[in-house]
Amino acid sequence: MCFLYSTPQYWPSLDLYGWGEIGRQLRELTREGRWAEMKGAVTDEMLAQLVPMAVHGEIADVIRDWYGGLAETITMRMPADPADDGAIGRVIASLAK
């Protein structure tokens, strides 16, 4: 997320919440190669506003609330642990309805 918001094309969403300066700060950190410092620029409040989050059993509803009527497709990161494949499969099936 930090690298994404270091890109000027994504700054309008930061500007919407009054966080435009964070995008410029992240860009400067990338230019200086200070990658480890980037995560400190993004707050929990920012994550809550910009990233839909929930447990597997609730995330489909959250995604529908956030993006229903706005998007025809979404991209989800697949879990690193294969034990979570079934839960993600159920989320995808729920979203496909």
Image: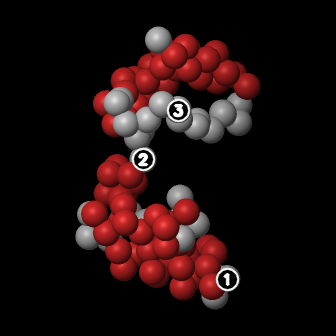
Circle 3 sits on which residue? 73
Circle 2 sits on which residue? 51
Q: Are marks 2 and 3 in contact (CB under 8 Å)?
A: no
Residue 87 seen in render: no
Label 1 and label 2: CA atoms lie apart by 25 Å
Dot placed on the residue nearer the N-terminal end, 2 or 3: 2
Amino acid under disc 1:
Gly
Amino acid under disc 2:
Val
Q: Residue at x 55, y 14 (%)?
A: 93
Circle 1 sits on which residue? 33
Residue 23 seen in render: yes
Residue 79 sits above or below residue 57 on the image: below
Residue 43 % position (x, y) = 38, 63
Residue 36 sits above or below residue 32 on the image: above
Image quarter of residue 71: top left
Q: Residue at x 51, y 16 (%)?
A: 96
Question: Which mark is on residue 86?
Answer: none
Residue 34 or 31: which is nearer the viewer? 31
Amino acid under disc 3:
Thr
Q: Residues within 10 Å of mark 3 (few under 14, many from 20)?
A: few
Dot placed on the residue nearer the N-terminal end, 1 or 3: 1
